[in-house]
Amino acid sequence: MLESIAVLETSAASERIAPHELSLAAYFMKMCMVTAFPDTRQKMMKTVTAFMIRVRTVFAKDIKRYDPLLAATDKAKHDALWRPLEPLYGFLDDVTRYAEENLYLDKPIEAAFPLFDVLKLVMDLFGGVEFKLNKAKSFEPVNFLAKAKGGHLLSSSSLFKFFVDSLKSSWTNVRLQAFALLSKYADEYPDFHDAGFVNGTLIAQALEYLNDPRAMMAEAAAQMLKLVFLKCIGVADLSLLAADFDGATQFDTPNDKRLAMLRLVLAEVKTRLLTFRTSLIAEGKTTALMHALLSFFKHVLADFSPGDKQQLGEARFTQWRAFFKDMLQTSLEISKVCANLLSNNRINDQGQEAVDCRGHPIAQSQDLT
């Protein structure tokens, strides 16, 4: 079967795609990509990626010409422009509906990985975000997912919430894939502007997981807060992060509110650092845990930039610079605490080094000052 799909890959990039080619590719993606062998899965995805790029190339001009608003003003022209895109829509609808109906995690996880990959590929090639295949090749956004039949493709709220729930998966690859897919949803997606969902689900769950010692839950908290930071900042209630923050505060730009969010998270890190010095994790005080908040900073700063001095202006640039200086100083304080923990060699009454339930050395507050 892989050889059959590989034949489709060899066709000329500009050559029209026959209906049987789309049917064969859809069948392959739905039925033949479940494997326990990562190498085999990678070979399959390489072939599927090449075919999907060919599909994108062939239909690109028709997608650009198509304007869904014509349905209200010139239906005959709208139908004429839509007709060449019907096979593409049918193909993508078939693949994405199968993924939505079968993408659940209480089956062998190997069955989920290919579906995550296929959905990500669909969003990369037919969504509203520039897709960089490699350093030399990139594809401008065509936004077919939003234009086709009122944005029906990948608009399911249940699929979106499945991705949110997948952020709590014990599988690192699932968490990363889920966040990658969530970040590719258009900024206009309704759930990003639903204050009840953003504040009552995303932020509320993230705050709950901050005190969970499990690494996967810490990562879930970090990714949920990052999703709020990037996509939902307009409706986020920052007073949930700090009781003394005025939730009615108005901001001139989204980045001003993002800076306020970063400051509140950093303030919580400082509070937990003080708690760590006095009421140690070894005593069961999970309010001293900082790994989720530090993970949030790691993920956010990996791909977010507020802009340079010229873009920000003198006043805003000064504010951002002061924040980063404060963050670096706090990082140095955390490093000192960690160094003292690592150098601790406390011996208990039995002549053994005292460790907690996870095997970490148990230090006393005087060791950390």
Image: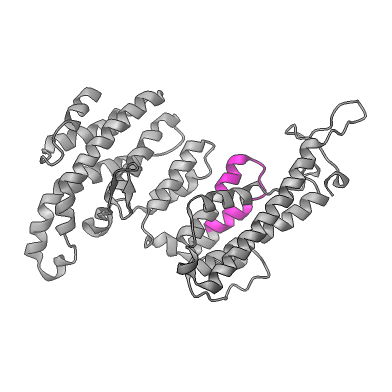
Q: What stretch is highlighted in magenta?
A: 201-221
Specify whether 138 is left or right of 191. left
Q: Nearer the viewer, residue 196 or 122?
A: 122
Task: List x then y, in percent, for residue 22.
Answer: 17, 37
Q: Which of 347 and 146 is in front in this view?
A: 347
Task: List x then y, in percent, for residue 227.
Answer: 49, 55
> Which image quarter: residue 347?
top right
> Which image quarter: residue 186?
bottom left
Q: Residue furthest right?
A: 349
Q: Which residue is drawn at 72% across and 46% down?
A: 335
Magenta-drawn stretch, dominant element (helix, strand or loop) = helix
Q: Can residue 76 be seen in this view?
A: yes
Task: List x then y, in percent, for residue 196.
Answer: 50, 64
Q: Residue at x 65, y 55 (%)?
A: 328
Can residue 243 be found in the magenta stretch? no
Q: Can residue 254 be seen in this view?
A: no
Q: Which residue is drawn at 9% across and 68% down?
A: 74
Q: Residue at x 15, y 69 (%)?
A: 72
Can residue 207 be found in the magenta stretch? yes
Task: List x then y, in percent, for residue 86.
Answer: 14, 49
Looking at the picture, the colour scheme in use is: one colour
Placement of the N terminus among the 4 image quadrants: top left
**Count of numbered marks:** 0
> Which image quarter: residue 344?
top right
